[in-house]
Image (tube, grey):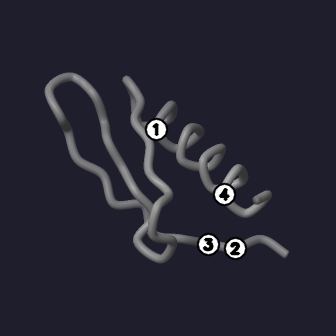
């Protein structure tokens, strides 16, 4: 089952920083929006694996 979440993101200097609105504690950064999305997805999978 695929879950959908809201990614809130903003620019911090030259980095995109973001977090999942519905999952506290899942956040990451990336140099591009694509990299940010990949990194947040990885952070989510690490959190649910615990």
Q: Residues within 10 Å of mark 1 (few under 14, many from 20)?
A: many
Tags 1 and 2 touching, CB below 8 Å: no
Q: Which comes sooner in the sequence, label 4 or label 2?
A: 2
Calculate the distance from the C-alpha at mark 1 to the C-alpha at mark 2. 18 Å
- Percent across and percent down for residue 42 are 65, 44
* Image quarter in which the N terminus is found: bottom right
Horizontal side of residue 37 vs 7, given as left or right? right
Q: Viewer-nearest of labels 4 and 3?
A: 4
Residue holding disc 4: 47
Q: Dot 1: what SS?
A: helix
Calculate the distance from the C-alpha at mark 4 to the C-alpha at mark 2. 14 Å
Calculate the distance from the C-alpha at mark 1 to the C-alpha at mark 3. 16 Å
Calculate the distance from the C-alpha at mark 4 to the C-alpha at mark 3. 16 Å
Q: Residue at x 18, y 34 (%)?
A: 12
Q: Which comes sooner in the sequence, label 1 or label 3?
A: 3
Residue furthest out toward the front? 50
Tags 1 and 3 touching, CB below 8 Å: no
Above or below residue 14? Residue 29 is below
Residue holding disc 3: 4
Q: Which comes sooner in the sequence, label 1 or label 2?
A: 2
Q: Residue at x 70, y 73 (%)?
A: 3
- Percent across and percent down for residue 6 are 45, 69
Residue holding disc 1: 36
Residue holding disc 2: 3
- Percent across and percent down for residue 8 are 33, 60
Q: Residues within 10 Å of mark 2 (few under 14, many from 20)?
A: few
Q: Dot 2: what SS?
A: loop
Q: Dot 3: what SS?
A: loop
Residue furthest out toward the left? 13
Q: Residues within 10 Å of mark 3 (few under 14, many from 20)?
A: few
Q: Residues within 10 Å of mark 4 (few under 14, many from 20)?
A: few
């Amino acid at each position: 089952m695929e879950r959908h979440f809201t990614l809130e993101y903003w620019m911090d200097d030259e980095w995109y920083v973001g977090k999942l609105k519905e999952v506290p504690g899942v956040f990451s950064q990336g140099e591009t929006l694509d990299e940010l999305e990949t990194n947040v997805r990885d952070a989510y999978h690490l959190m649910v694996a615990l």
